[in-house]
Image (cartoon, helix red, strand yellow):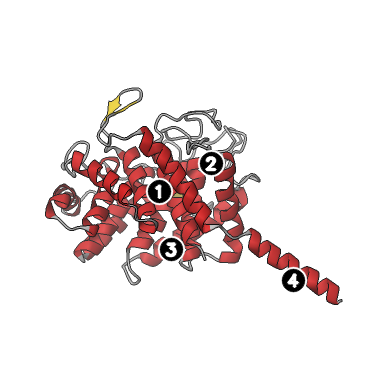
Amino acid sequence: MKKSIIVLIFLSVSVTFAQQFDRDEVLQQMQLANKYFMEKWPDVGKTIVTNRERPSNIWTRGVYYEGLMALYEIYPKEEYYDYAFDWAEFHKWNFRYGTANRNADDYCAAQTYIDLYNLEPDSKKLKSTRATMNMLLNTPQLDDWSWIDAIQMGMPVFAKMGVLENDNRYFEKMYEMYMYTRNKHGDNGLYNPKDGLWWRDKDYDPPYKEPNGEDCYWSRGNGWVIGALAKVLDIVPEGTPHREEYVADLQAMAEALIPIQRKDGFWNSSLHDPNNFGGKELTGTALFVYAMAYGVNNGILDKDKYLPTIKKGWDAMIEDGLHDNGFLGYVQSTGKEPSTGQPLSFDKIPDFEDYGLGCFLLAGSEIYKME
């Protein structure tokens, strides 16, 4: 009997240890991936050339800098701050098409501008951000976020400005825009509460189906939403209007994601059709890990329930995605559906390398904070 008890205790302790993260190792992995990118792109203002030339303050680079600032928060290396500051300075703290622009992809960069302002306030840093946000606050449109990626690009900007200005108008407008996307875009909104997942835009809600007859839930699109919810909850204080609704949506999405995680730890590009371009995909996986880890770290998600899923996802990205030189494999190129950029592989370079790294750094930053 005593022997059985000892064995059970040993097994329990072994499982607990197996689910822990080596904090130093996590930080080294984040630094490795970031070093690869910074060395490849030493000039922060260099245009990005793929099928055409684009400035370096578009959403893909904005997402990278979100991740870099998350890394800087846990490891404030001066080089990281300088890289972000120099980027903002190069672009004069402005957006791709200036301030009279409602496209969340373009004002995504404001997330980092606000972070840098908070570290060292200077009114010039937020001149363009304030102009754009004032326009959005003082005009009646609620339907700007007609694709779910926009929730991640735009929603945290409202949250950060609401906190910075101590102004609930930002929180109310953010909520109204979020709920319009959730409940009204497309035929009946882009969120399906029955499945706890989101259609990418009106082109993918029913009657559109995947080849197996299931609804089309794109992995990275859903990652953008749950990542945005985690980020907003991290920004706004307890008692902020509508906060509990965001908590409920994050919880519902996390619950829906557990049973569809692949055995290898990744999630498929098509969340409900594993045979439609099924395979390892890093960006959606990173955003799911980020949001779940945030939820556990902040008492929103149950640790015992979600830690194994988080651990599997992080380990998969490290073991099967991170190269020895810091390059990240299995990153799906820009697009809007499971077929984009397929097939993926360990060595395939996506059209943009920046946003995948940003997602990875966000995930790592929350893994690093885990008890």
Residue to which mark 1 is pinned: 189
Task: Inspect the image, locate mark 3, and give the three-letter code of the amino acid beneath it.
Answer: Val
Which of 105/42 is in front?
A: 42
Mark found first going from the N terminus, 1 or 4: 4
- Outermost front residue: 78
- Residue in the image at 54% along x and 51% along y: 195
Secondary structure under tag 2 reads: loop
Residue to which mark 3 is pinned: 247
Secondary structure under tag 1 reads: loop
Task: Inspect the image, locate mark 1, and give the three-letter code of the amino acid beneath it.
Answer: Gly
Residue to which mark 4 is pinned: 9
Image depth: mark 2 or mark 3 in front: 3
- Whether residue 201 is visible to the viewer of this picture, yes or no, is no
- Residue in the image at 55% along x and 53% along y: 256
**Distance from label 2 to label 3 (Cα)?**
24 Å
Mark found first going from the N terminus, 1 or 2: 1
**Distance from label 1 to label 2 (Cα)?**
14 Å
Q: Residues within 10 Å of mark 3 (few under 14, many from 20)?
A: some
- Residue in the image at 59% along x and 35% along y: 278
Q: Where is residue 164 in the image (x, y as percent from the top left)?
A: 22, 62
- Residue in the image at 31% along x and 35% along y: 42
Residue to which mark 2 is pinned: 215
| Residue 13 horizontal side relative to residue 213, left or right | right
Quadrant of image for the N terminus: bottom right
Q: Where is residue 18 in the image (x, y as percent from the top left)?
A: 65, 59
**Distance from label 3 to label 1 (Cα)?**
19 Å
Q: Residues within 10 Å of mark 4 (few under 14, many from 20)?
A: few
Do residues under tags 3 and 4 come within 8 Å of each other at their CB atoms?
Answer: no
Using the rendered view, name the quadrant where residue 165 is placed. Answer: bottom left
**Distance from label 3 to label 4 (Cα)?**
35 Å
